[in-house]
């Protein structure tokens, strides 16, 4: 389900957002330097505050979430996995955030368990999940579904 294309897309987004943040940050710091050189302290402080706010905004809204998703993709690729064979009982409609990724919970009843387990699947990959009631082989990393095959 997760491919190298996913990794390259996320890497491209991180670079794009970092470049955008850097260009505007350099501009705001240049304005600060010019205003500070002209001894206009209040506008210089406003420009420096704007630079700090801009950098904080870009990091919190764009760069850090992309970096967390990139770490998630790396873990999904390199982490230990296990296979669960069972019937998909329910797919929850509520979107949650687990490990920095938007996911939906999937209730799976394995062949050797009566109660079942709750696993998580990425919202972007939900279309690859078999229908409710079908038996499937789920390749999991922790509680996250890495790959799905129908039986």
Image (spheres, grey):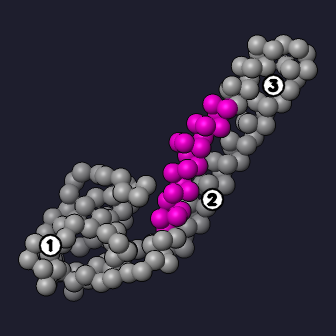
Badge 3 is on which residue? 32
Relative horizontal placement of residue 69, taking residue 47 as reference (left or right):
left
Residue 13 lies, with reference to residue 50, above or below; the image says below
Q: Residue at x 67, y 48 (%)?
A: 18
Residue 147 lies, with reference to residue 30, above or below; the image says below
Q: Residue at x 61, y 61 (%)?
A: 11
Residue toward you, 65 or 126: 65
Ranked by sequence position, the earlier of labels 1 and 2 is 2
Relative horizontal placement of residue 59, taking residue 95 as reference (left or right):
right
Prevalent SS, magenta region: helix
SS of the residue under disc 2: helix
Q: Residue furthest left?
A: 114
Tag 1–tag 2 contact (CB < 8 Å): no
When asked about the image quadrant of residue 10, the answer is: bottom right
Badge 1 is on which residue? 116
- Is residue 101 visible in the rendered image? The answer is yes
Relative horizontal placement of residue 85, taking residue 22 as reference (left or right):
left
SS of the residue under disc 3: helix
Give the residues drawn in magenta, as a range.
Answer: 52-73
Percent position of residue 132, x then y: 15, 69
**Label 3 crowd (10 A; few <14 / some 14-19 / many >=20):** many
When asked about the image quadrant of residue 46, the answer is: top right
Q: Which mark is residue 79?
A: none
Q: Residue at x 34, y 69 (%)?
A: 144
Ranked by sequence position, the earlier of labels 2 and 3 is 2
Residue 65 lies, with reference to residue 140, above or below; the image says above
Q: Which mark is residue 12?
A: 2
**Label 2 crowd (10 A; few <14 / some 14-19 / many >=20):** few
SS of the residue under disc 1: loop
- Is residue 149 visible in the rendered image? The answer is no
How many labels sit on residues?
A: 3
Q: CA distance from mark 1 to mark 3?
A: 60 Å
């Amino acid at each position: 389900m997760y491919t190298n294309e996913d990794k390259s897309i996320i890497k491209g987004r991180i670079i794009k957002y970092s470049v955008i943040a850097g260009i505007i940050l350099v501009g705001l710091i240049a304005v600060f330097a010019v205003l500070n050189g002209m001894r206009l302290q209040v506008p210089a402080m406003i420009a420096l505050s704007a630079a700090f706010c801009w950098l904080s905004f870009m990091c919190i809204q764009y760069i850090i979430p992309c970096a967390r998703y990139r770490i998630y993709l790396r873990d999904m690729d390199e982490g230990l996995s296990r296979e669960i064979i069972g019937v998909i009982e329910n797919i929850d409609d509520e979107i949650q955030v687990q490990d920095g990724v938007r996911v939906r919970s999937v209730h799976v009843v394995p062949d050797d368990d009566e109660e079942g387990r709750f696993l998580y699947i990425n919202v972007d990959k939900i279309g690859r999940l078999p229908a409710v009631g079908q038996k499937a082989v789920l390749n999991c990393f922790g509680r996250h579904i890495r790959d799905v095959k129908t039986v």
